[in-house]
Amino acid sequence: SSPSDPRPDDAPASAALLARARAVTPGGVNSPVRAFRSVGGTPRFMVSGRGPYLTDADGREYVDLVGSWGPMILGHAHPAVLDAVHEAASRGTSFGTPSENEVLLAEEIVARVEPVQQVRLVSSGTEATMSAIRLARGFTGRPLVVKFAGHYHGHVDSLLVAAGSGVATLALPDSSGVPAQMAAETVVLPYNDVAALEAAFAARGDQIACVITEAAAGNMGAVPPDPGFTAALRRVTAEHGALLVSDEVMTGFRCSPAGWWGHERAGVDPDLMTFGKVMGGGFPAAAFGGRCDVMALLAPDGPVYQAGTLSGNPVATAAGYTTLRHCDDAVYARLAEVSRALGDAAAEALSAAGVPHRVQRVSSMFSVFFRDGEVRDYDDARDQDTAAFGRFFHAMLDAGVYLPPSAYECWFVSAAHDDTAVQRVLDALPAAARAAAG
Ligand code: PLP
């Protein structure tokens, strides 16, 4: 059967909603990886979330290992976040003026992430990377951007080249609609390859505005930078007067209180950083920030234009600030514990079933590759048995565990994943591993 065949276990209420959605929305979804294209079957329409659980339109409950693709670090409907949202919303939902909540969130980010002296708030990770790149080009007066194959930085035109996440899931080389001239401004290099980096800079270093990198890759599965790779990025960019932009939209405030930067502690300070997901607490809030002398170029102080009707929205910033304030040591300890337990158990179940696999970690983010051997770059990540993943995914779904519907995504845990939720996942793994074996 092809992945798009209907499955006997498909949920009727979700199927009915999907039919309505398809009539009015392309593919029935507002973001492509939600569509289950690579695993087949009917995407579940969720109606509620609480703690580590989601409930779908058919009334089935799942242990959620997607966490809205990263933001839900405290679990769904966290009482303190809900209180903050209610309190903020009761005073009005958008002013189009500055407000104190924006200052609180910006202060919190600047206090945690040392290389960030100033931030500008935006509404999505895509806006954050798009704006950071414009700023890097404005600061250097150079056109080119270096990115790494398999890294995803949102759907910015010039960054949709050899991108991870949904682009990888749908097996698209690049997106249609990105003009060749625009793609030509992007230099794509293999990840974790210092020689390729040095060669690119030797050839065109005086044209390169910045290198943008996921601080640690999470959009082709979890692929950490090799020891010394981030330091090499810093050295080479500095030698050539280019900026280093570290994209922490996924890793930020998840891998440690100060994100991957805080986790790695390699002494490597990027010039600019981008954030999203956790810092929005489940609302549209994101940010880019960095060195004061670079940020000074932004309008209204400087000539690089950047703006947003809903930027720094008072409800979103209240949710984000409250989420960050609740991310204490106990939260990070629980994330580490749960991800260790789940990753180890997945490896054990797949080993017992004889399924080739590799579990990789980026702090408390982790992913399961359906192949043997270390994954260091996008070529490695693409060399997986995605059909085995599809069988595994559906067996887990049938058992009430909601995994990312793609072999290229990290599994996201939250501090709300208690022992009961963890046990439900552990109980589901052996049969799913046998299903993956085919
Ligand atoms: N950068 C990274 C590293 C991401 O993981 C993502 C989203 O998955 C983005 C940027 C884009 O963020 P958004 O989906 O909020 O536009």
Image (cartoon, grey):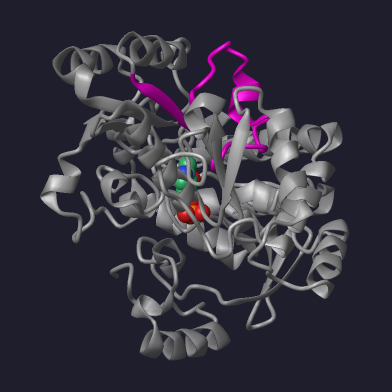
Image-quadrant location for residue 347: top right
Whether residue 239 is situated above or below residue 303 in the rendered picture: above
Whether residue 330 is situated above or below residue 421 in the rendered picture: above
Say if residue 408 shows up in the picture: no
* 376 on left or right of 109: left
Which is nearer the eye, 169 or 252? 252
Q: For the stretch drawn in magenta, what is the main secondary structure?
A: loop
Residue at 39% x, 65% y is: 32
Residue at 61% x, 55% y is: 285
Q: Is residue 245 highlighted in magenta?
A: yes
* 413 on left or right of 433: right
Total marks placed = 0
The x, y position of residue 12, in whole percent, is: 54, 87
The x, y position of residue 121, in whole percent, is: 59, 49
Residue range in magenta is 242-271
Say if residue 130 shows up in the picture: yes
Looking at the figure, which quarter contains the N terminus?
A: bottom left
The x, y position of residue 402, in whole percent, is: 60, 60
* 403 on left or right of 103: left
Which is nearer the eye, 125 or 65? 125
The x, y position of residue 81, in whole percent, is: 81, 58
Q: Is residue 262 highlighted in magenta?
A: yes
Residue at 57% x, 87% y is: 13
Looking at the figure, which quarter contains the C terminus?
A: bottom left
